[in-house]
Image: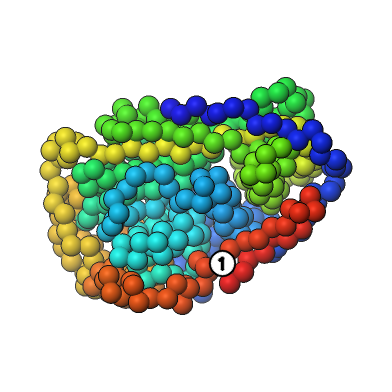
Amino acid sequence: MADPGDSIEADTNDQHSEDDDDETLPRSITSSIYQYREENGHTYHAYKDGLYPYPNDPNELDRLDLQHHLLKLTLGQRLFLAPIKKNPQNVLDIATGTGVWAGEFADDYPSCLVTANDLSPSQAFELPPNVLFEVDDANEPWIYHRRFDFIHARQHHGAVEEKRLMQQSLEFLHPEGWLEMQEYSFPMKCDDNTFPSDCSLYKWSELMVEASRQIGQDLHKPVYYEQWMKDAGFVNVKAMVYKIPTNKWPREKNEKTKGLWQMANILQGLSGVTLALFTRVLGWQASEIEEFLKGVQKDIRNRNIHAYWEFYAVYGQKSKIAEHQEMARIQTPYSSNTSVGNDARGREAKHPGGMVGGRALVNVQDRMPLRLGRPARSGPLTRPEAENRKPGTLHPPFQRYMTINIKQNSFETLQYQQ
């Protein structure tokens, strides 16, 4: 596993008050999966109700898009680190969230069919034509009738059981295909003893770990990804660990910028990511939580506390030897009609016609992903089509980006631009 690196140096010349980073963060389908669970002012996914204890309301979806850009900044403006082949044809994004990662990957690889799934149908309707969304639970046996060149899983917070995900990924990857998993790790850390155990932020971090362990979604699991991937049979496994500070306390400019984005990320989502775990698992009252979070918010803004999260990016490759151990038959990706064939494990399975560039619903009875959107084309964009397509003309939501102004040492603007 890659060394987390040297300690982040704090900016000792930074004159500030605890309040100078205050900012204003901008911002029918009758199927049962759109009838979200409402609880303590937030909404949660309806399909597999309770599996993922984090909200899916508009505030949270905006935060997830913000976090996407923060993580790209952390990875050097890259969507992934795995050395995938230059022309992938089938890619799977597990727990896609808003779908922004899938949309940007589809833009970068227009001849690739990108399949993205999630428990919530919260993705944008205007999508690249080579994206397929499905509402499904990745913990269930996968029913895809094709193999993937690359499988990506980011920020599922343990709601998808990792060892099972790794094993199913190994089965559904092409030989020499790659799996990459990206995840924050708890508890929070500090290198210079400025993170006292009696502060609210420290207590919150520990309580988040305790609650997540009680429901089997331990937020500390990412530290084991590298070994688990090797144990599953992956080769060429590599783990990279990045430090993401709580606010602008670091001295180095890039780290300060990451801290600024992370502060906005956490402040916007703090209530949402806390309420369900604390009420359902720890037995707290909502009013009690909100009072406690006032202290947490204050600590997040406090640049005298030099705390950070570790962010793990771990990837591994399926070997040719692993392929010889499986019996599988690769199917043609999608047709516009229902077809019967063998899935990637060689079993007979029935598959509905695809809906590319749209979203999906789930038929709970037989767990066949039902896709919502434009009827499927015969396949991904051809090379001439891809080269002639003008970026942004088909899916404006994935051309948006956020700007922040840190010249005046404050979080002044956070704005989506089309």
Which secondary structure lies at badge 1? loop
Dividing the picture into quarters, in which one does residue 342 lie?
A: bottom left
Which quadrant: the N terminus? top left
Reading the image, the residue beneath label 1 is 400
All told, the count of numbered labels is 1
Identified at 84% across, 48% down, the residue is 20
Would residue 157 appear left or right of 142 to someone viewing this image?
Answer: right
Identified at 39% across, 53% down, the residue is 93
The colour scheme used to paint the residues is rainbow
Q: Is residue 71 visible?
A: no
Q: Residues within 10 Å of mark 1 (few under 14, many from 20)?
A: some
Dividing the picture into quarters, in which one does residue 274 lie?
A: top right
User: x, y (%) of residue 355?
Assistant: 33, 70
User: x, y (%) of residue 364?
Assistant: 36, 58
In this rendering, the answer to whether 260 lies above or below 373 is above
User: x, y (%) of residue 131?
Assistant: 37, 65
In this rendering, the answer to whether 302 lies above or below 141 is above
Which quadrant: the C terminus? bottom right
Would residue 205 appear left or right of 32 to someone viewing this image?
Answer: right
Q: Is residue 331 visible?
A: yes
User: x, y (%) of residue 349?
Assistant: 19, 56
The front one of 375 and 25 is: 25
Identified at 30% across, 65% down, the residue is 111
The front one of 318 and 410 is: 410
Identified at 39% across, 30% down, the residue is 226
In this rendering, the answer to whether 150 lies above or below 132 is above
**Amino acid tagged 1:** Arg
